[in-house]
């Protein structure tokens, strides 16, 4: 190893699917992981996932007898403090490549794949549609293996 300045490792990046955002709203495990690894990892989500999370969290909160306003507050906080929202203008140039990878499973998921391609990052999801798209995919029960090795 060369002498000089110590190597500083870059934070690990990961793209969150909408279902992970909703888990952050309704549970504690995802929020705990986001908080625990905020200094060593960078969390991203495409703008469409945030819109989906806002749209679905209210109805899911109501079904679980949780105040929907609380869910919106949590989403606002985590996307303000912990998760960077990627605007469609940044990932849309990867649309054709992303659609080719996900088309046989769920073509509506192309923005998540495109964002992962843009950032050269894996995907954190509970959706099996991403498996086999050529991008590493992590589920909540294994994501800490990826995050703690940063």
Image (spheres, grey):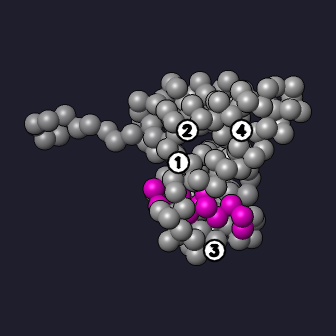
What residue is shown with label 3? 100
Give the x, y percent position of residue 65.
87, 25
Q: Is residue 94 magenta?
A: no
103 is higher (above) or lower (below) than 30: below
Between tags 4 and 3, which lies in front? Answer: 4
Residue carrying label 1: 85
Whichever of callouts 3 and 2 sits on the residue coming sooner in the sequence is 2
> Which of the pair 106/144 is nearer the observer?
106
Mark 3 and mark 2: Cα distance apart in space:
29 Å
Q: Which residue is mark 2?
A: 79
Which residue is found at the position 66% from the left and 26% from the top? 29
The x, y position of residue 85, in whole percent, is 53, 48
Q: Which residue is mark 4?
A: 22
Q: What is the residue that sits farthest to the front in this orientation? A: 69
Disc 3 crowd rating (10 Å Cα; few below 14, some 14-19, many 20+) is few
Question: N-terminal of the two: label 2 or label 1?
Answer: 2
Looking at the image, residue 7 lies above or below residue 85: above
10 Å neighbourhood of mark 1: few (<14), some, or many (≥20)? some
Q: Please, is residue 109 above or below residue 51 in the view?
A: below
Q: Are marks 2 and 1 in contact (CB under 8 Å)?
A: yes
| Element type where label 4 sits in the image | helix
Please, what secondary structure does the residue beneath circle 3 have? helix
Which numbered mark, 3 or 1, is in the foreground of this view? 1
Taking depth in this image into account, of 50 and 125 the one nearest to the observer is 50
Q: Which residue occupies 58% across, 75% down?
A: 96
Q: Is residue 96 visible?
A: yes
- Magenta segment, which residues? 107-119
Q: Residue at x 64, y 55 (%)?
A: 48
Dot 4, how many residues are within 10 Å of its Cα: few (below 14), some (14-19), or many (20+)?
many
Q: CA distance from mark 4 to mark 3?
A: 27 Å
Which comes sooner in the sequence, label 4 or label 1?
4
């Amino acid at each position: 190893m060369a002498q000089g300045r110590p190597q500083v490792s870059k934070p690990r990046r990961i793209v969150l699917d909408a279902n992970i955002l909703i888990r952050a709203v309704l549970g504690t495990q995802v929020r705990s992981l986001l908080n625990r690894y905020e200094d060593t990892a960078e969390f991203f989500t495409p703008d469409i996932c945030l819109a989906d999370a806002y749209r679905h969290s209210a109805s899911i909160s109501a079904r679980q007898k949780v105040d929907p306003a609380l869910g919106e507050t949590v989403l606002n906080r985590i996307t303000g403090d912990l998760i960077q929202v990627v605007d469609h203008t940044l990932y849309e140039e990867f649309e054709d490549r992303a659609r080719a990878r996900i088309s046989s499973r769920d073509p509506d998921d192309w923005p998540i794949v495109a964002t992962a391609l843009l950032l050269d990052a894996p995907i954190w999801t509970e959706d099996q549609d991403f498996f086999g798209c050529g991008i590493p995919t992590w589920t909540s029960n294994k994501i800490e293996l990826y995050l703690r090795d940063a």
